[in-house]
Amino acid sequence: MSLITVLSPLGINRVGAQPLATRVRSLDGITLGILNNSKPNSLELQRYLVELIGHRHRVAGSITKQKPSAAIGADGLDAYAKEVGAVITAISD
Amino acid sequence: MTICTEAFIGLAREESKNLGMPDLPLAIIKHPLGGESRAVIHQRAEDALAQVVRGLTGDAATRPVAAASSADTTVNDRFTFASEDEALETFHARRLTDGLPVVLPTAERVQAMIAGSGRRANEVIAVVPPRWAEATVENIAINAVMAGCRPQYMPVLIAALQAAADPAFGLYSVQATTHPSAVLMLVSGPIVDELGLNFRHGAFGPGFRANASIGRAMRLVLINVGGGIPGEGDQATHGSPAKFSYCVAENEAATPWEPFRVTRGFAKSDSTVTVFSGEGPHNVNDHVCTSAETTLTVVADTMTTIGHNNAGSVIRGDVLIAFGPEHAHTVASGGLSRGDVQKFLYERARNKVGLLKLRAMYKAENWPDWVDQEDDEALCPIVGKPEDIHIVVTGGPGKHSAFVPTFGTSKSVTRKIEIRA
């Protein structure tokens, strides 16, 4: 029987392993970041969530950073990371 | 910490893996968020609370970093089968096709396709999201063989991928969105005749190998290299027939204005391909109008709906008008230049602010600053400036034109098609 050999059409991902952001020991005293992507209801979700967290932890406050569109990457993330201790973001429709 | 609804778990997991963070914690909540009441959204937040707190304070940072980001690095580069039928069934089963049978990419066929590019097999042409995998000349050639291309089509495909990889195009979003955007390729220049690209009857339709196979090859690259698999890396709610194949050519002989490529800054002797994040074409049927103004009014009315993405994401997108030769003749006979047409459509294709506010995707931040958002009777254009309405002539006889809205947060990109010996 003659075999048929074909090439794989898949591409190769060469992105190296990336470390995750360091987690905080406690949310007490932390300024929470809300990185919002402008999708409908997303900001309401994130703000209410931060409010709920505030009922249980002594968070220092929150800073919202608004992306003009879900389809556009946020700029200035390094500076934002210096302002906040942890960030909450969301993907959905 | 990332919150994700159930409908997007697959994309979130794939994307975190593809970006080298397979252990990225996610808080999973019910779908959807859009169109839900405030009470429902608050319940979603309640549901996310414990997961988010755990994710923010958990032990993720102490976990060992994954050795490799993607299973793709371990894929075999060749498959051996007992028969052609077995090979085809395996390609279907592994979701390596668009659902239709393919030409099997044997080494000999792929080698011939690579030769058609005039480039080295391992040259990286683009990195294709959402898998963020490299599209080498060889990868592209394999998918081109599968699509039924001839080797001389390779330069078009390569230029189109280079254009689609331009950040202005936003390929990640075009691939992963729920919107039915496809990658529309518009070819302009001498290569249209050289390759036998159709630009007459059925310019957007089937029946012509060059158009059909180049468009299909692009889609196969987006699926196989980019991971744009429906329900996985491609989250389109409905998708579109345009996602099978979407390659159209300019009918230059019937164009009363300068060729499309010249409007994009290229020489008339050049050949170019322009990519648009296009929905399928929306028909403009006008068998009555005899003047430029009335014809363009019908075109503008077709553009003036609030359901397409450009209606809300005004300043970040562009659109394409594909005039049929007869409509183009009527318009140009009125003495209007391409710029005049763009200005007319920019001024007429506008939606009322009050109507736009009804849209679930209402995004005032993407409207021009000069639009009075407090006045529901104020009119908002669908693009940021007249030049964002691109004009081309294609198609055969008949009183039809086409409006192609786009993803909205995406700009068309043009690349010169380079023929290398």
Image (tube, coloured by chain):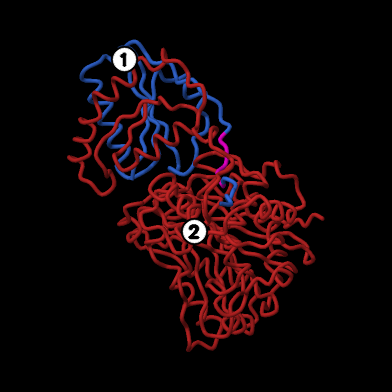
Chain colours: A blue, B red
Q: Residue B62 location, x and y as percent?
A: 41, 12
- Say above or below: B42 vs B25: below
Direction top: furthest residue? A25
- Residue B283's mark? none
Task: State the extent of the magenta-drawn residues as a range.
Answer: A9-13
Q: Amino acid at mark 2?
A: Thr
Using residue A29 as the reference point, say whether residue B420 is left or right of it.
right
- Residue A27's mark? 1
Q: Residue at x 38, y 62 (%)?
A: B306
Helix, strand or loop at label 1? It is loop
User: Which chain is home to disc 1?
Assistant: A
- Residue B416 included in the magenta stretch of the image: no
Q: Residue at x 21, y 17 (%)?
A: A56
- Say above or below: B74 vs B175: above
Q: Residues within 10 Å of mark 1 (few under 14, many from 20)?
A: many
Using residue A59 as the reference point, say whether residue B325 is left or right of it.
right
> Which residue matches tag 2?
B406
Residue B336 is drawn in which quadrant? bottom right
Direction front: furthest residue? A1
Q: Nearer the viewer, residue B39 or B20?
A: B20
User: Which chain is home to disc 2?
Assistant: B
**Residues at discs 2 and 1 in contact (Cβ within 8 Å):** no
Q: Amino acid at mark 1?
A: Leu
For the N terminus of chain B, which image quadrant? top left
